[in-house]
Amino acid sequence: MIKKEKVTERKTDFKYEIWSNELQKIYGKKDKAFEAVKKINLRVEPGIHGFLGPNGAGKTTTMSMLVGAISITSGEAKIRNEDAGSVAARRLFGFLPQDPVFYNHMTGEDYLIYMGKLGGLHKTEARKRAQELCAYFDIFDDRVRPIGEYSGGMKQKIGIAAALIHKPKLLILDEPTANLDPIGRASIIEKIKEISKTVSVFVSSHILSEIEQMCDRVTMINNGEIVISDTLKNIKKKYIGNTYQLDTNKNQEILQSLEKKDYVQKAWIKEEDETVQVIPKDADRLQTEIPKLILDNKAIMYSFHIPEVSLQDIFMEVYALGGSKK
Amino acid sequence: MSLETIKKKTKSLFLRVKSETVENEAFRNMLILTIKTYQDLTSLKKFLISLVGMMLFPIIFLSFETTIDYNSISVQHAAAAISIQIIFPMFFWTLGIAFICIIGTSGASLIAEEVHSGTMLILVSKPIRRIKIFLGKFLGLFLYGAVLSFCAVFLLGWIAVLRYSANLLHFFALMPFLLASYLYSLVLLLIFCSITLALSSIMDRPRNAALGVLFLVIFSFIGMMVLKMFIADYYEDYYLYHIDLGYHLSNIYISFLEAFNAIPLVAEWQQWFAMTTGVYETASPTDPDQDINPGGMIRTDYYLPIFSLLIWIGIAIGLLAYGLFSLKNREISV
């Protein structure tokens, strides 16, 4: 009976490209144990899904478990209903690791053919596909040069082409734009957006603006825990109107006063423009009390409004509200 | 036959075909890795340097003057005399120190370097089991070693013939000796490919894996030889032959030669083995009254050759399994 239920559950879960249940990774043993991923439940639907988090949040560890590079301490994960790490699952995805390393003596084309053959293609098919991908990524003329001579952007393109060579159903990209210049980043983002029309993409980054440009859905992770997972639209809807921005000539003093008020849940100074950000417990009281607060501090108010939210603001707000539990 | 039965049979046939296809794919992937490993190892420059390195010491041996007129004796005698000239440098250097060092340094990087540099991360994300990655690399290294030792053994035989007689018939007559030496090199390869790949799987850095193999070679061929020379009594008293890889290897090599009837059993070459490997007793077998050598030196017989072979094949398989296990359970990250 239990088995039957499990089978039914898995059939239902097939709608997910990536599915995990209480996925956990602990490094080390006993006193030195470090829990890098804390029993997360990932749900990645078809489309392009961003995986966000600061450095050291657990993104790469999670992806490494999904591709089978490291073992899962407890819980389970599935790639299109195949056990993560199994050969069957590895047939279904293409993977680009963070800072990918190549066989520098091989030419770009030979490397792609080799990867294609390992992915199950026959040599002629792999060669044809390698040439198609080189043309698609604008490195056709450079395909016969050794990878060691490639620029960072070209290496990244070869890395994504290698992940795509065996026509996978899903692409797992770990920080694909890391270490690239702005032009290289824009070019890779554009390509990922194009690819995502035919292949599902699970992409990690700590650069929020990039994820905002690319993704339909995002999962935010911090300290090994998922802090939010939803469509970008829903997340923005949920967080819009919740954070007020106040700008005066005495922002620091105003912040100190606000932090003492019982109608304020959280207040901080935004680094970029040094304005005061306020999350109220009682929005009406905040609006009525602000003029008094300005007068008390003998400050001049330049603006007080609810700004349009970016993913960056949401990210900061999520963590400010306790996304970072430690 | 009911429709349900037909459906079931079709499904079972489909699953079997699918499972066979998956198996074939896994085997194909292993073969791709074998070929890639072999190609990476076999650059022409590296191959030639290795070949020259393997023949350097024997060629010095061949440069010594000889009083035998090889073209005036029978072909069989000439071939035997040539084999006597090259057997010790062949065992000690060509298929000993040089060959093992080349296999060790070439193979040490095969897994450790991929893990250390990060290329293994991409490899393990491909649909191929880690066991197949390990075996693919093992076979690639084995193939490289087999080609290298084949070239070295037969080229050395040919150079020796050219040096002494330049008679093609002598080369053909030398064939049992060369074949026995080549077969021995394959056993050696099995042992040292396993050791190298196991170390490469366990160690974090390729340098450490290479140093591990080099240490083993120095210990086996030079360390134990020095020990035997200076503390000969302790060698037997403390049963040091148990751990003397040089002894076991020479025990196996000589058995191969005996099995192929590849070389006359005379003290002229046996004394070298007696001194260095302990496979023969160092005392002279010559009858002092008649000053006659009754037919070579006496084998020490610490181990039956088959046991020497089985022990080392067992160790090779054990290390292979350990290497496989460590790669299978290794956390691969950048």
Image (spheres, grey):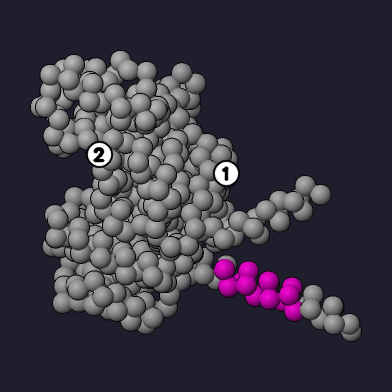
In this rendering, the answer to whether B198 lies above or below B224 is below
Residue located 85% across and 78% down the image: B5
- The number of numbered badges drawn on the structure is 2
Q: Is residue B18 magenta?
A: yes
Q: Residue B81: name its quadrant.
A: bottom left
Q: In the rendering, at what x and y percent does residue A134 appear?
A: 25, 74
Disc 2 and disc 1: Cα gap in Å?
41 Å
For badge 2, the amino acid type reads His
Chain letter behind tag 2: A
Q: Which residues are magenta?
A: B10-22
Residue located 25% across and 26% down the image: A290
- Label 1 belongs to which residue? A21
Chain letter behind tag 1: A
Residue located 17% across and 54% down the image: A180
**Mark 2 nearby-residue class (10 Å; few <14, some 14–19, many ≥20):** few
**Mark 1 nearby-residue class (10 Å; few <14, some 14–19, many ≥20):** some
Q: In the rendering, at what x and y percent does residue A167 appear?
A: 42, 71
For badge 1, the amino acid type reads Asn
In this rendering, the answer to whether A107 lies above or below B1 is above
Q: In the rendering, at what x and y percent does residue A318 appear?
A: 37, 35
Q: Secondary structure at mark 1?
A: strand
Q: Which of B262 and A234 lies nearest the eye of the viewer?
A: A234
Q: Quadrant of the C terminus of chain A?
A: top left
Residue A298 makes an appearance in the image: yes
> In this image, B29 relative to A240: left or right?
right
Residue B299 makes an appearance in the image: no
Task: Give me the disc on residue A305.
Answer: 2
Q: Which of B198 and A311 lies nearest the eye of the viewer?
A: A311
Q: Secondary structure at mark 2?
A: strand
From the image, state whether disc 2 or disc 1 is nearer to you: 2
Q: Is residue B202 magenta?
A: no
